Amino acid sequence: MIIPVILAGGTGTRLWPLSTRDCPKQFLPLLDPERSLLQQTLLRAQDLLQRLGQPAVEPIIVCHEAQRFLAAEQCRALNIRAQIVLEDEGRNTAQALALAAQHLAHNSQHLAHNSQKLREHREQTLMLAMPADQTLSDNAVLAQAIVSLQAQVSQGAAGIFGIEPDYAATGFGYLRKEASGQVVEFREKPDAHTAAQWLAANTRQQAGWLWNSGIFFWQVQSFLQRLSEYQPMLFAATQEAMAQAQQDLDFIRPATGPLQQCPHLPVDIALLEPLSTIAQAVVAAPLVNSGWNDIGNWRALSELGEADAQGNIEHNSAAAHGRFQHSRNNYLHSSSGRDIALLGVQDLLVVDTADALMIAHKDQAQQVGSLAPVASAGKAEPRLVHRPWGSYEVLHPGDGYKIKRLRVKTGGRLSLQRHRFRAEHWVVVRGEATVIRQRDGVQSREVLHANESTFIALGDIHSLENNGDILLEMIEVQSGDYLAEDDIERLQDAYGRK
């Protein structure tokens, strides 16, 4: 049985300023206005199992605990039940895969009633690890490649899928495959000269050098055995962390203590590179004409857009439209609604959000990630913030007041809370708001509709719920001497926050 493992813990800094620490790129609808990259990956995994003739199973999602509610909500929107394993700190793909494998192995002990059944179950369980921030336009190609490797993977080999390069890319890792399918070498991102040499060495009959797609196919038992041999510290730490894991609402929360000493390693370096020295220990299948793209930077995303006659691409512009005059081969992504004009320029990446404006030459797309930590350090609060109940957007921060737009999803509820330093005025724009107040231990409920409002005095114990059938949108006007988000004393919270 194949279990999809979705790796959703990346920080997505190379797509700053759209991708942020609060909402990395895998949770954004970059290619489909209705679905995020994570949601597209979940649907792709479902389709793969159908193509392979396998019944649907619950996928495993490994993500950072800060994005747990985003992941859960996006699964709920697709009506997909997933097992969400949380990382307290991202330590690259080796730890993420190890936690998923340990979870599958631990579950095997509960599924099997004797040692023989346990061994058979583990031997039959294969995990297909898929990054949540990639796109693949032809899923049939991946399904065929999985079938081509399944026998070897079932016997203990590590399977990986390569992409036949069509240009000398410097932003991808590479692997070298022999005619037998065995991978004999892994190399990290090369310089342009080296990448060109590798591309020239490939032949039409048998491509030697392939881009490393980051999609892995592995028998759970074999993965854990190799992990214990080559990374014993990581094996022991993740085994203990999952043995002590706690179920927290819909989430699986590994014990954090054992993971503190885990090395920060990609699975390529931790396992695949040393294994490539052993005959048939790592095997690869190429994904030919699959439409694969890892959306690793703004240039990669721009190549998926539709250009005008001058090569300019405008993507996801909100309200206003960009204008191009005497300009060529530019990419514009705007979610701010501002009118943006480009005059007499070429080969630029222009990304405009409510929080920041980024302008870069396309040749520098790989370096955009270096800007994100600087931006995060210099700005205490982003304008758009995601919460388990929905989101809020700061429309205008003023001296002694702040105006926000609140969006509360159906069934969402804010914590029962109070503020020491601010009062709040709420105006319903759309939907139905249930306002809860608590005084002297007695709760009262008031239902507000569009164009109705209420006032939350300083110190009032209050909450808010959306019990309606549509998204609740409200305008919140805060007033007071101190308006930071840490002026919240939570008394009860449906999501386990403190």
Image: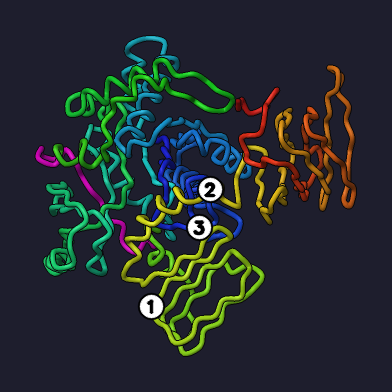
Is 80 magenta? The answer is: no
Q: Picture quarter containing residue 113?
A: top left
Q: CA distance from mark 1 to mark 2?
A: 31 Å
Q: Residue type at mark 1?
A: Asp
Precedes in sequence: disc 2 or disc 3: 3
Tag shown at residue 18: 3
Provide the secondary structure element on which disc 1 rests. loop
Task: Name the one closer to the observer, 79 or 70.
Answer: 70
Where residue 169 appears, as percent x and y from the top left, is: 25, 64
Label 3 CA crowd tier, 10 Å (few <14, some 14–19, many 20+)? many
Residue receiving disc 2: 39
Where residue 94 appears, as percent x and y from the top left, is: 29, 35
Task: Name the one closer to the observer, 212 or 12.
Answer: 12
Provide the secondary structure element on which disc 2 rests. helix
For the point 65% across and 51% down, the residue is 393
Q: Residue type at mark 2?
A: Gln
Q: Is residue 297 visible in this depiction of the protein?
A: yes
Q: Residue type at mark 3?
A: Leu
Between circles 1 and 2, the one closer to the viewer is 1
Residue receiving disc 1: 347
Task: Name the one closer to the observer, 438 or 307.
Answer: 438
Above or below, 306 relative to 220: below
For the point 49% across and 32% down, the residue is 84
Where residue 377 appears, as percent x and y from the top left, is: 44, 48
Label 2 CA crowd tier, 10 Å (few <14, some 14–19, many 20+)? many
Q: CA distance from mark 1 to mark 3?
A: 19 Å
Where residue 205 appears, as percent x and y from the top left, is: 16, 65
Precedes in sequence: disc 1 or disc 2: 2
Q: Which residues are magenta?
A: 276-294
